[in-house]
Amino acid sequence: MNFLKTNYKNIIYSLLILGVGFGVGYYMKKKPSSKFASEAPVAEWKTAILKDTEGKSVRPSELSGNLFVVYFGFSHCPDMCPMALNDIENAFTSLKEDTENITPVFITIDPERDTPEVLRKYISRFPGKELVALTGGKDQIGELQKGFGVFSQKNQIPQGNGEYGMDHTLFIYLVDRTGNILRAYPTGIKGEELAKEIRELL
């Protein structure tokens, strides 16, 4: 819960003023901060009870692996979420056999639409290393987001017949089993560079 607490307002402000791109254009011009880390474990990593793509209840900390590549997004995302997942996939391709104890995790910020079945179909678009997708109750997802300092809000689509998008924080997190955020990178980091950063933690 304390992660990014002192900088949370600044992060939200930066995201809001960057508009539809939500920070990507700005962050891609900067070198990712590879030494970015939380001061304490995210408690919700152990306490949140979510659902996997089979509808089974699971706590993130109970997933297999010792290192987790975590991204918060939603299946209806037209661009940024697929970009991030492709970057993660490319990183795993570069790491090859070194990914044995690393698990990529996609956590929805849109549980209203992202049911286990929807997420199961969504992650099938990303072949290679098996991607774990998690959904759950709105409150559980919200508390986990707060723990990571992840901001999100609905964005009605003009002439979208009730459809909506989701503005959200665009970071890829490297997390250990106890919930420590070891490093974080903006969407747009190249797979090869992400792989290099991950190797430093192995």
Image (tube, rainbow, N blue to C red):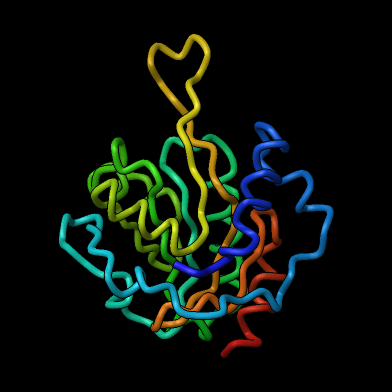
Q: Residue at the far right: name it.
A: 29
Q: Nearer the viewer, residue 103 or 161?
A: 161
Judge whether residue 100 can be spotted in this image.
Answer: no
Q: How many marks?
A: 0
Q: Residue furthest left?
A: 56
Quarter that holds the N terminus: bottom left
Instruction: Compare residues 66 and 41 and report the one nearer the observer.
Output: 41
Residue under the point 51% across and 54% down: 150
Quadrant (top left/top right/bottom left/bottom right) for the C terminus? bottom right
In front: 21, or 103?
A: 21
172 sits to left or right of 60: right
Taking the spot 48% from the left edge, 21% from the top edge, the residue there is: 156
Residue 98, compared with residue 120, is above or below; it is below
Q: Is residue 167 visible?
A: yes
Residue 144 in picture, x, y percent from top left: 38, 60
Up-down: is 18 above or below 37? above
Point out the residue furthest to the bottom here. 202
Residue in the foreground of this view, choosing between 194 and 41? 41
Q: 145 above or below 93? A: above
Q: Which residue corresponds to the image point at 42% horizontal and 85% vertical from the top-left?
A: 66
**Quarter-of-image position of residue 4:** bottom right
Return the x and y of residue 104 as percentages of the image width and height. Answer: 45, 68
Taking 73 as reference, is 200 left or right? right
* Residue 119 picture location, percent across and down: 32, 47
Residue 113 percent location from the top left of the image: 30, 36
